[in-house]
Image (spheres, rainbow, N blue to C red):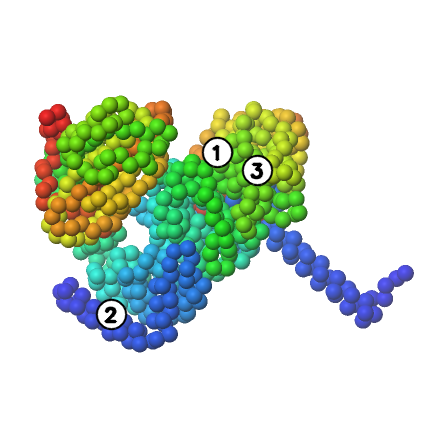
Amino acid sequence: MTIFKTISILTLSSVLTNSLFAKEAPYSEAIEVIKAVQNEGEGNEAAAAAWKQIIQGDATSVVPVLEAMNGSNGLASNWLISAAQAIVDRELTNGNALPLEQLGAFLMDTRQEARARRLAFELIQRVDPETAQQLVPGMINDPSNALRRDAVAGLLDEAEAMVEAEKKPAASIVYRQALGAARDIDQVESASKALQELGQKVDLPKHFGFLMHWSVVGPFDNTERKGFDTVFPPEEGVDLTGEYDGKAGKVSWSRLATSDNYGMVDVNKAYGPLKEVTAYAFTEYESPSDQPAQLRLGCKNAWKIWLNGELVFARDEYHRGIRIDQYQLPVNLQKGKNTLLVKLCQNEQEEDWTVQWQFQLRVCDATGTALLATNRLPTPTSRQARARNES
Amino acid sequence: MKANLECPRYQTLLMMKLTLTLFLCSLTFSAAEDWRQFRGPSGSGYTKSSIPEKPEVAWSLDLPGKGLSSPIIVGEHVYLTSSSGASQERLHVFCFKASDGAKVWERQFFSTGRTMCHDKTAVAAPTPVSDGKRILALFSSNDLFCLDLEGNVLWLRGLTNDYPNASNSLGLASSPIIADGVFIAHVENDSESFAAGIELEAGKNLWKKDRTKRANWTSPIVVKGADGKELAALQGSKGVDVVDPKTGAVVWRYDEGASTIPSSAADAQGNLYIPSNGLTAVKPRKDGKSEQLWRNAGMRPGTASPLVQEAKVFVITNANVLTCGDLESGARVWRMRLEGPIGGSPVANDSHLYAFSEKGLFQVVQLGEEKGEVIHTVDLGEMIQCTPAVADEALYVRSNGRLWKLGKAQG
């Protein structure tokens, strides 16, 4: 039987089971109660009662509970996933079997919630590790990072073994496949490092979708950190030919491209290692369609970010660390031109670990897959970036 | 006069007395044995419990992911948290049997807040807390879960959902407390800094107050108020605010600055021993301010928090020097060097102090009047940053990936 036939049967089985399950009104109502929980503890009392009702279900209720995570907020998902685990633990303790076929069908249904599918995989792994292991390679392009991670890890292991066996061309191919599928930073780094050691070129900025070409203006004042809340002219409208009163005289826009593998835009390169200053960075992003996306920012300075003139988020934390995807901001891109404006504040601290005045920003989907702009320029080399910045 | 043992009335009285004695014994036993919060019942690591002079490993078990939260003990069970996954987004709450380490239950959740933190810490950094009926587990992602002792979820919160800028890119680590029946979360950070009192039944805010916008890893402690009621001491860069747990109103305040890493300790009278200008002992004044009892600039705690015994106070400096001070005067009594570095706070009873180095070396210090002496060590071989829990004549301590029980040597 082909994997597709298996999936079809499993999916049908799941649909039938879920349909039957859905007819059990009190149970469905309990799930709806949980899905209604909101911030600040709203709905907690009712959810606790519903949770106790849900965990009375037998093993066949696990998949419907996981299915309910689809479209649930994070709080409701935590109620549901803990309920599913409670059912599983009790059923296994009592010697009852888990519905493997249902779990398999649920796992294969990529429309379902990613974390719930990961849990389904782990349940299969718990009771039938051999089958679970067979499923792993097939998840190399799964929309769930948590699922494709195991498949990527498998490819990385295979490629490493090939290198050790002196099969370097084959290893390059497998590493390339692993890199293409990898979304977690550690796996991307492992694959790209190995490829570079094998003499292969890797365009990491493109893989991640980092925005490499910016226009910057500054420095404006940030004495006593007041610049964070001060509305300087770029916030009122970007005019790349404009000239403004800066902290120490007139300031105007200039180009700032980066060739950094991780898209780091170092504002110190434009203005020097200043303190108590603010700068703005601007770029345009052409989207092929209206689409949901995430702006993923890494920054250890205080920052604000606007998409198409609308403030997306602001944060006034200084020098507590930076990493890729530190902040994940859901947005909706419009078809055609989108404008991105980043405000970047440097504070008064003098320690050597407070010199950085920089950020890294990428555009991707919710899984971390790069969404490349139609106006994306080739990733510049360091020489090209320098030449562009001096032009 | 000789009692008539066969008299029914006497027998009834005897039975009532026996029952009452057993009941009181059970209460005492339960209260003495539980270790329901970070640094135990006293809030400073001091216990009257008996601990073997030379504990050895009784059992150990593997844990997933990372964590430097401490275990807590309620009844016969150990409760602990950890965080796993590529970005530590999976949050675990465990219940193990104290007797043999067998897992009783595990609940897993996903973070709804940010999980970024320094490599040396973890999303499972704050120690859970219990009122004896519930386990409340807070994580650096600001996810808060309340479960009963059987693992049933009673309520949950995502405090970063509620307050989107309440996070610290180095990681939050403040362990919560329960004071006067109210859960106290102390989420001080550079941005959306706050403390909140949350009721235990359904997890709703009783109050929320803005706090100083500065990163802070200290934990609140329970301190006795003038009327005997429990108050909550919130320590931050500006000092310590001692607040009414039910309203958040400041009852008294110390405002001469304080550390943002080691936390304060309290004594049974409601005085505070604050990592401030070394170590500063204060008592409350009726006007809402504080009166300094003593200050010893030489007793500056490092990462570990001070420990208050009945008549002594202990600090471990960043140079790994354990200093014993007189609780009444603050004068140094003796000092000695331990193997370090030491990140976790020590625990002690009246005769011994127990400390773990980050290299995994467990050290038992015999506490003398004139000196301390290391009388026993066990090399656990893994990085230990947590503060141990003590119950039933044993210590419980964890590394990122392992939980140990150290008790009486077998055989």
* Mark 3 to mark 1 CA distance (whole Å): 13 Å
Callout 2–callout 1 Cβ contact below 8 Å: no
Q: Which mark is residue B237?
A: 1
> Helix, strand, or loop for circle 3?
strand
Chain letter for mark 2: A
Q: Is residue A265 above or below residue B86?
A: above
Residue sitting at x 90%, y 61%:
B1
Callout 3–callout 1 Cβ contact below 8 Å: no
Residue sitting at x 24%, y 61%:
A112
Q: Which mark is residue B253?
A: 3
Q: Amino acid at mark 3?
A: Arg
Foreground residue among A232 and B323:
A232
Q: Which mark is residue A14?
A: 2
Residue sitting at x 39%, y 51%:
B162
Q: Is B350 on the left-hand or right-hand side of B405?
A: right
State which tag comes first along the sequence, 3 or 1. Answer: 1
Foreground residue among A36 and A191:
A36
Depth-wise, is mark 2 or mark 1 nearer the camera? 1
Depth-wise, is mark 3 or mark 2 nearer the camera? 3
* Mark 3 to mark 2 CA distance (whole Å): 61 Å
Residue B151 x/y as whole percent:
45, 59
Q: Considering the image in quadrants, where does the C terminus of chain A appear?
A: top left
